[in-house]
Image: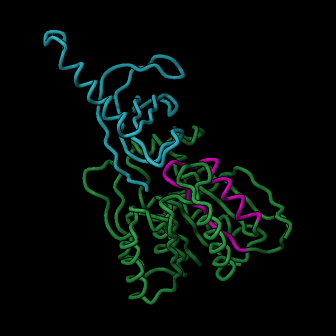
Chain colours: A green, B cyan
């Protein structure tokens, strides 16, 4: 593996046939490869998540990150777009699923596609990755510290995600969950509830909870970055992808 | 964590943004991940015109204590103003 890649901004067909912006990174040293949809966190379609997208390509996977806020603020800076999306009540679940489906279709249409697609999401995207896996034929799902997967967010907030746990029987592929032991959203106890639901549904999963890590330990540009957990987490991710979509 | 805790409030006034002075009609208050302030979480405030350009907003990120002091000071100032000026 040379880690050679090509990365660019493209347009894809998302939910309801809408044309939305997306960031595509593909390895250029392979003839066929698996793929992954990258779901950005609530702060948006930002530079840090583009860097994550490129890392997948450098490791041999076609990676595509749809801009979930493109409709609210086409062409806006990521933080401004995130502010508009939040003021509008966040991304509706149905639209998220439609956009991930569009990203899947684009990846499967690449000449290098082996037909297999995973999803990964961080923070709010962790919940959305699990949700997408419950509603789409994804071959593997990665949830990085997604909150409100087993409980609904409290009433009264203008942005209010709801639990996904009731849908896990529909998962088509295995789940990798990566969490911080010090995180309160989600708590380790909530992750245990998710594990119990996956067990009850007979689903395959690997859950890792890292001591000393809180929320968002992969974020290299934030104080929450926890290097040991991030390094180990990336190793888990690449091992999981190798077993599921490579 | 993404708290998602978000409140929107209708307001009436003006704010000076990168594009200059604009009328504003909405404030969005949340406690979540800041973009620039070096903390895991902060009190975040967007003052904007709901129908305006996404870039036309005042974005503020404060630690919790600063936000409480600011909120208390605003209330204190308003409470000290003669009723006939409000």
Residue drawn at (75%, 74%) of the image: A33
Image position, residue B50 (x, y; %): 39, 33
Comparing A119 with A184, the one in front is A184
* Picture layout, residue A192 above or below residue B23: below
Of residues A24 and A199, the one nearer the viewer is: A199
Whether B22 is drawn above or below B69: the answer is above
Report if residue A36 lies within the magenta region.
yes
Which residues fall within the magenta stretch?
A: A34-58
Give residue B35's position: percent from left, percent from top: 52, 42
Relative image position of residue A209 (x, y in whole percent): 50, 73
Q: Is residue A209 left or right of residue A92?
A: right
**Figure check: A73 above or below A229:** above
Residue farthest to the front? A212
Q: Nearer the viewer, residue A191 or B29?
A: A191
Quarter of the view holding residue B8? top left
Residue at the location (74% across, 72% down)? A113
- Quick one: quadrant of the N terminus of chain B? bottom left
Residue A132 horizontal side relative to residue B85, left or right: right
User: Quick check: B71 left or right of A206?
Assistant: left
Tell which residue pokes out farthest to the left in this image: B83
Q: Residue A64's spot in the image, x, y percent?
A: 65, 60
């Amino acid at each position: 593996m040379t880690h050679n890649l090509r990365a660019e901004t493209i347009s894809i067909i998302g939910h309801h046939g809408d044309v939305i912006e997306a960031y595509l990174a593909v390895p250029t040293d392979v003839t066929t490869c698996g793929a992954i949809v990258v779901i950005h966190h609530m702060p948006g379609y930002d530079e840090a998540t583009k860097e994550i997208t490129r890392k997948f390509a450098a490791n041999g996977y076609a990676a595509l990150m749809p801009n979930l806020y493109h409709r609210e603020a086409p062409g806006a800076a990521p933080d401004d777009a995130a502010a508009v999306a939040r003021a509008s009540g966040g991304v509706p679940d149905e639209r998220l699923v439609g956009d991930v489906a569009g990203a899947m279709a684009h990846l499967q249409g690449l000449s290098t596609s082996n037909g297999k697609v995973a999803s990964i999401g961080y923070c709010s995207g962790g919940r959305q990755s699990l949700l997408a896996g419950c509603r789409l034929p994804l071959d593997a799902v990665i949830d990085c510290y997604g909150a409100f997967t087993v409980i609904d967010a409290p009433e009264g907030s203008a942005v209010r995600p709801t639990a996904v746990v009731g849908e896990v029987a529909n998962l088509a592929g295995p789940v990798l969950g990566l969490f911080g032991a010090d995180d309160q959203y989600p708590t380790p106890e909530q992750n245990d509830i998710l594990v119990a639901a996956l067990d009850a549904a007979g689903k395959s999963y690997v859950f890792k909870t890292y001591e000393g890590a809180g929320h968002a330990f992969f974020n290299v540009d934030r104080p929450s970055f926890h290097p040991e957990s991030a390094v180990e987490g990336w190793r888990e991710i690449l091992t999981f992808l190798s077993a599921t979509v490579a | 964590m993404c708290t998602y805790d978000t409140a929107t409030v209708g307001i009436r006034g003006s704010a000076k943004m990168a594009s200059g002075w604009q009328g504003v009609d909405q404030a969005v208050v949340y406690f979540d991940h800041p973009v620039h302030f070096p903390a895991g979480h902060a009190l975040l405030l967007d003052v904007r015109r709901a129908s305006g350009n996404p870039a036309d907003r005042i974005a503020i990120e404060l630690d919790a204590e600063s936000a409480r002091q600011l909120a208390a000071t605003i209330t204190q100032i308003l409470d000290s103003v003669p009723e006939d000026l409000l």
